[in-house]
Image (tube, grey):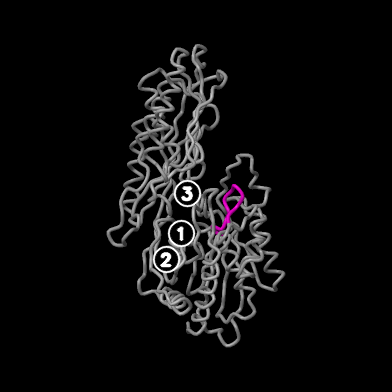
Amino acid sequence: MKVSELNPRRVFEIFDQITKIPRPSKKEGKIRQYLLDFAKEHGLEAKTDEIGNVEILKPASEGHGDAPTVILQGHMDMVCESNDKSFDFENNPITTIVDGEWVRADGTTLGADNGIGVAAALAVLTDPDLVHGPLKALFTMDEETGMTGAFNIDPSMLEGQILINLDSEDDAEIFVGCAGGVDTVCTFTYKRSFAPKDFNYFKISIEKGQGGHSGGDIHLGRANANKLLARFLFDLSKKYELALSEIDGGNLRNAIPRAAHAVVGVHTSHKEEVRVMLNEFAAKVADEYGDIEPTLEIKMESVEVPAYSIDSDTTTAIIRSVYCAPHGVVAMSRDIEGLVETSTNLASVKMQGDDKVVVTTSQRSSIESSKWNIANQVEATFLLAGATVEHGEGYPGWKPNMQSTIMKLASDAYKELYDVTPKIMAIHAGLECGLFLEKFPHLDMVSFGPTLRDVHSPSERMHIPAVERFYEQLKLTLRKVADLKK
């Protein structure tokens, strides 16, 4: 069966169209044009703001013009991760596969985060039978790599009374709060040295980890490829003189790194000992992670002598700091059972230009002071190693409002439809709602969506039955809002 043939048909037809449109973060031109064309095709008013967000308006159903204006909000971009490093996300469509009750992609991220939210909003705008008050559909850009659209949004796009964020990932759960976050970038400047000719060189690779969302999956204890690589290099450096010529791991600040590699050399007399060390290390990692990382691979291959290596002092500083830098859950919430309160993700290690290695980390917390506490711990770690450190602007959390009207209506809708009372939750992942609330404190907000798993990784998948429940909940919630008065 094709994705476009699934139910709810209207939602999946639009989602299928969206998967065919390349939409990496900061390169949303094609999906933006699709949205504008969609609005024009259906006779709806649309506009973009200066930064590139898109707004589509739909008048209220007859007799419901006095109802509160509802903003349906999602983001245009998607995380681009692939098992095939040559996959061109800027030009190639996503290939979707119906796999039992799930939709997944063929070796890449699916983009259901947040393509399914965008599809649901567009389906609502074109549903002739839906009764609703005044509607806005708001689609922001660059949510995944900086929330640029939300930071720079035209304030007029947030004029309304209620906002429903469609960027959550669990059926039968309604989110009323989220963590704030900040990125920390640590830069090492090194001197180039000639690679010793009497060394044997190897490419050591950590591959095919589970990865996942650095907010939603951080509590699962999955392997961080950067940390594993640094751990092995640290062990190696304690026994032998080591030349580091190349290091690379992870990609996105909000994804747990699935893969990392380094090109290193040791004296030719130690060639076989390094292979033995790696085999022993791989066995330890397999024992430690067990079923958590069933596909993880640790391997080594011989390579030619490189042209240069990183100077020994900086090599030591990089290995030690990446190895000892914090990663994972820092604290659990004492207010909401099972909720991660504070975490940090050692996201990427990248060589830049001819003399820099840049380490990027991402910190999250539902408590502002705790967010900065862990960010400062990361800073201190890398300052001790001689790096320069900069923190990003960060984004605020979203404090729950347990008296929310839209929370009650959305909960009542799900209960009425499925005789299940949904859980009222906060999420450790970052949502744009915190930024919206900072700009428009009066907004009554809620977030819900269908079940997604392993987002931000090529294992991303979406539960088909949950999409139908999500869409029916959305429609009934809008029907209930239509009966309210401003």
> Which residue matches tag 1?
431
Name the spot of residue 289 as percent of width and height, x first: 39, 41
Q: Is residue 474 magenta?
A: no
Residue at 44% in and 49% down: 214
**Image mark for residue 106:** none
Q: Give the residue type at disc 2.
A: Phe
Compared to 87, does 238 lie above or below?
above
> Which residue matches tag 2?
175
Cα separation between marks 2 and 1: 10 Å
Depth order, front residue of 216/322: 216
Displayed quadrant of residue 240: top left
Residue at 64% in and 70% down: 10
Task: Determine the secondary structure under disc 2.
Answer: strand
Q: Which numbered disc flags the more N-terminal residue, 3 or 1?
A: 3
Q: Residues within 10 Å of mark 1 (few under 14, many from 20)?
A: many
Compared to 451, does 235 lie above or below?
above
Q: Nearer the viewer, mark 3 or mark 1?
A: 3
Report whether residue 391 is seen: no
Displayed quadrant of residue 313: top left
Residue at 48% in and 45% down: 210
> Which residue matches tag 3?
212
Residue span colored magenta: 104-114
Q: Looking at the figure, which quarter contains the N terminus?
A: bottom right
Lateral position of residue 443 relative to residue 326, left or right:
right
Q: Which numbered disc flags the more N-terminal residue, 3 or 2?
A: 2
Q: Which numbered disc flags the more N-terminal residue, 2 or 1?
A: 2
Name the spot of residue 469 as percent of width and height, x first: 52, 71
Q: Give the residue type at disc 1.
A: Leu
